[in-house]
């Protein structure tokens, strides 16, 4: 029953460096797609702390959290999945890029921002990221609403 479950809160982090954005490539069965580095918020953890931890775990990169940029919900039409995506800005402070041993993560890379429009990204925020990275993000968090995509 829908009322008995809670949405998952996922923190994604926008990290840029030299006209590139840090992305993680996931593979599930025959599907391959890109995501911002990030993951599930743990009980008692702040959004900023979650972002810093997840970026380090998934990429080997150290970041300093800046501010909340975007909020987007992905609600699967059948109700099986509901994720609240909190996207924060992170400033690169060091570390060496590495791919974790998680089976789902295929690769980690600095992707040219110009390539964002041609990749499959979940949640589907590539267009919004391109606009924000080229023209600046709003000074307040932007709520994108429900943006589920198969």
Image (spheres, rainbow, N blue to C red):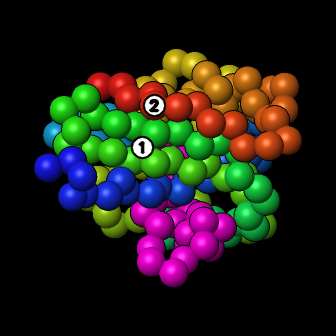
Work out whether residue 21 can be spotted.
no
Q: Residues within 10 Å of mark 1 (few under 14, many from 20)?
A: some
Q: Nearer the viewer, mark 2 or mark 1?
A: 2
Question: Looking at the image, is mark 2 or mark 1 earlier in the sequence?
Answer: 1
Residue 25's mark?
A: 1
Question: Which of the 4 quarters of the picture holds residue 20?
Answer: top right
Taking the spot 76% from the left edge, 47% from the top edge, the residue there is 17
Distance in Å between CA atoms under marks 2 and 1:
23 Å
Taking the spot 28% from the left edge, 34% from the top edge, the residue there is 76
Q: Position of residue 29 (x, y in %)?
A: 17, 40
Q: Position of residue 69 (x, y in %)?
A: 71, 45
Question: Which of the 4 quarters of the picture holds residue 18?
Answer: top right
Residue 106's mark?
A: none
Residue that mark 2 sits on: 146
Magenta span contains residue 48 = yes
Q: Position of residue 103 (x, y in %)?
A: 26, 58
Taking the spot 81% from the left edge, 35% from the top edge, the residue there is 138
Write the start and end of the magenta stretch as one range: 35-56
């Amino acid at each position: 029953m829908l009322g008995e479950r809670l949405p998952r809160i996922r923190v994604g982090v926008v990290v840029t460096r030299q006209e590139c954005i840090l992305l993680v490539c996931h593979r599930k069965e025959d599907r391959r797609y890109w995501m911002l580095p990030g993951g599930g918020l743990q009980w008692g953890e702040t959004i900023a702390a979650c972002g810093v931890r997840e970026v380090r775990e998934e990429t080997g990169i150290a970041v300093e959290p800046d501010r909340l940029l975007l909020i987007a919900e992905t609600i699967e039409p059948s109700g099986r999945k509901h994720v609240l995506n909190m996207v924060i800005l992170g400033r690169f402070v060091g570390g060496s890029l590495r791919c974790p041993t998680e089976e789902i993560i295929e690769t980690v890379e600095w992707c040219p921002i110009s390539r964002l429009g041609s990749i499959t990204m979940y949640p589907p925020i590539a267009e919004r990221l391109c606009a924000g990275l080229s023209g600046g993000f709003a000074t307040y968090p932007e709520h994108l609403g429900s943006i589920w995509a198969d």
